[in-house]
Image (spheres, rainbow, N blue to C red):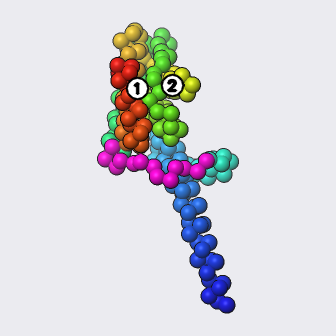
Amino acid sequence: MSERASAPSAVRRPRWAARVRPRVLEIVWLTFVWVLLWGTFSPLSIVGGVVVAVAVIGAFRFPPAEAHLPVRPLRLLLLVGYLVYDMVVSGAEVSWQVLRYGPAARGAVFEVPLLSSSDRVVTVVANALSLSPGAMTLQIDHAHGLWFVYALGPRDGAGVERSRRRTMDMQRRVLAALGTPEELATAERLLAERGC
């Protein structure tokens, strides 16, 4: 009798763990993004991040993640390093623009080819761009394979081209860290077609 009673609980435990483990990882990731957005690594910001992450996951039922996310640890580490570098440089550039031009500071909206249609890659790139001061994804047009991005600072065509190249570089780095071999091949083909 006791053997029969213990068998179902042994079966239930892995199912429960399989459901909870991805949620814990999502909470950790969302908390990390929350702390980065607030810019303070304090107990209050971490607790606030956990509360917001649990609320978001509870309110929105996300589709199940892919069984295997292609993660290349060295490329991911390089991507994180680049994001930190980009936040520092972009923050300095935005500060300079505001100090130098004040209310006359200019911005530009430009389009960039979308290198991947994967929701995972597009989401990471859009969030990475939003972390960069002075840049923001305005719209993603899947039908035409385009991003529309806003950048603070470009005052001429050369400045817009620099911002466009920076956005393309961000896409390449995210794909190198998290893209599947098929996504990488598709991106290389698109870049070759557009001469980027």
Q: Amino acid at mark 2?
A: Gly
Pick whichever, 155 or 137, lies toward us: 137
Does the segment drawn in magenta span residue 69?
A: yes
Pick whichever, 117 or 76, lies toward us: 117
Q: Where is residue 72 shown, x and y percent of the image?
A: 35, 47
Q: Give the SS element for disc 1.
A: helix
Can residue 95 be seen at all in this image of the molecule?
Answer: no
Are dots 2 and 1 in contact, CB under 8 Å?
yes
Assign the magenta stretch its main secondary structure: loop
Work out whether 112 lies above or below 26.
above
Q: Give the SS element for disc 2.
A: loop
Left/right of residue 20 with respect to residue 89 in the rendered view? right
- Indicate which disc, 2 or 1, sits on the residue closer to the N terminus: 2
Q: Where is residue 89 shown, x and y percent of the image?
A: 35, 29
Residue sitting at x 34%, y 36%: 82
Q: Amino acid at mark 1?
A: Leu
Q: Which residues are magenta?
A: 63-75
Specify the quadrant that holds the C terminus: top left
Q: Which residue is mark 1?
A: 190
Residue sitting at x 50%, y 53%: 67
Work out whether 153 lies above or below 181.
above
